[in-house]
Amino acid sequence: MELKLNRETVPAAETIYDGVQEQALEMDYILPDYCPDIFRLIRCDTTPVITDWSISGDRLTYELMCDIHILYCGEEGSAVQSVDQHRSFTRTVELGRAADSPEVRLVPKTDHVNYRAVNKRRLDLRGAVSVKISVTGQQEQEVISDAFGMNIQLKKAPVKFAAQRINAVKNVRIEEDMELTPAQPDISSVLSCRCRAGDCEIKLISGKLLAKGEVQTELLYSGSEGAVEHMSFSLSYSQIIDVEGIDDSFECAVIPEVVSCNVTAAADGDGNNRILRCETEIRLGCRAVKTSTAMIAEDAFSTVYPCNVEMSEIKAEQIPSVYDESFRHSARLAEGDAVPQTIYAMWSEPKNINTRIGDDGRSVVISGMLSYSMAAKDNAGMIVMPDRDEAFEETIGLPDDISGAYVSAEVSVKETAYDISAEGVLNARADITVKLSVYSSDSIKAVTNIVIDDSAKKERDGDYAIKLYFGIENENVWDIAKRYSTSVEAIMEENELSGERLENGGMLLIPIVS
């Protein structure tokens, strides 16, 4: 009887490219005639964002846009002025080889920025941004799932893997006009705008995804009397995403990212600047994965013939386990005369986030910096917007053992608040949300081919039907069966064993099968 092999294809994610690309950022800017001279620089913010990307063969091309926002005070008064500029770059990355069903992750961040006033009308900026680039593809691995004939024995194990994945992207523009309340002063100029996309609610409807969510917006503007005003509001969206081939057998997630957020002042019916015109663009990235389970062979032997078993280590792509966690961070920012006279607004941003698995294997340690910023008036009556970096480390316990897994964390600040104690200490606190994605990194040795030599049979050390063997606790019955060229089923039946590992050590009867 010939040996017949059944094979199974197990897809696995393979890393095509993992690296960081840097981009220099320079600006030499002369103020237009309608802007007042520079008296004092207050703040500079640079926000890099990926606006588009594409892959052609073994080359990745992406568009990087950097928003530059500089605030200063003019000589003629304390009113805050703003300078907004954009720098766009087209970059390419040689991946080394083409990727099958590629998934691309591009994470830009500002590395450093130095800015100065060359004179009263000229600004000079030098800095750098970087983009962390990760490209993964799918690699098909063919393994043995079953075998028949020639007294073959297989040790099988179930493997769960991502059998199919679908990616889709949709850009959405949200446009809305908002009117100030009667208690708020007219808008002199918009100083800064920060947007954060919250979690997305999704629903599958007739092969399409309905995505609903909100974009939280925080705004600073200069009022008619020169004071800085703070506003926060949310913009809602509801979009249908076409995802070809999707059905309810897929697990889906939609990640919203803010591409741009622009707020300008507009006049109302009386000609006063009391309308905020909001234009926001977000990118909805959809990832849908269908899982499957297959029985694959981990080991093999023939009870009669010598055979050669070819093995390979496979790592099946897994759907990550996602945990939503939160914690609070507190910081002592100033005391005594260093506390500003007036605080208009305070906010915070996480940066330089690192994650590692705790020593107990059931927790994740998240560390990084939390940058607290405020818009305030100091004791000299000047508008200031200082930053204060505070280190943090938080341990988050998880219900499962994640030893050997890969963990990624998306950290964001939900809310920042502050208070000034009776002793004159300025304290801040930030409510931080964390989305942990835990990717199982378990790999398995799988049989990829079996070759049997049927020209000769195995030689035995004697002519017997049963052999005595002293087993040890927790020993695998498969190892015993392979050593004596018999079957697991025969050993378990002869010794009335309930499992494939020995519960206790002791004497076993090893029946010899042919």
Image: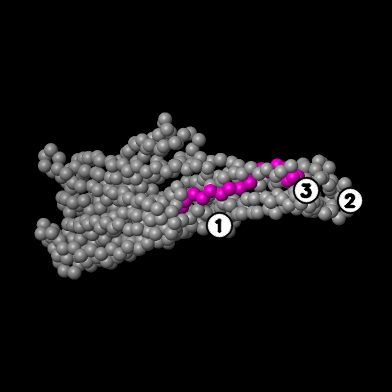
Q: Earlier in the sequence, mark 2 or mark 3?
A: 3
Q: Amino acid at mark 3?
A: Thr
Q: Determine which quarter of the picture holds residue 293.
A: top right
Secondary structure found at label 2: loop
Query: Start and end of the magenta stretch?
Result: 135-152
Q: Is residue 180 visible?
A: no
Provide the major secondary structure of the magenta segment: strand
Q: Amino acid at mark 1?
A: Gly
Q: Residue at x 25, y 53 (%)?
A: 192
Q: Determine which quarter of the picture holds residue 123.
A: bottom left
Q: Residue at x 14, y 65 (%)?
A: 121
> For mark 3, what is the residue?
303
Q: Are marks 2 and 3 in contact (CB under 8 Å)?
A: no
Secondary structure found at label 1: loop
Label 1, residues with CA under 10 Å away: few <14, some 14-19, many ≥20 = some
Q: Earlier in the sequence, mark 3 or mark 1?
A: 3
Label 3, residues with CA under 10 Å away: few <14, some 14-19, many ≥20 = many
- Give the Cα distance between marks 3 and 1: 45 Å
Where, quadrant-wise, is the N terminus in this rendering? Answer: top right
Residue most extreme to the top: 206
Q: Are marks 2 and 1 in contact (CB under 8 Å)?
A: no
Is 60 displayed left or right of 455 in the figure? left
> For mark 1, what is the residue?
358
x and y percent of residue 360 in the render?
59, 56
x and y percent of residue 189 in the render?
18, 51
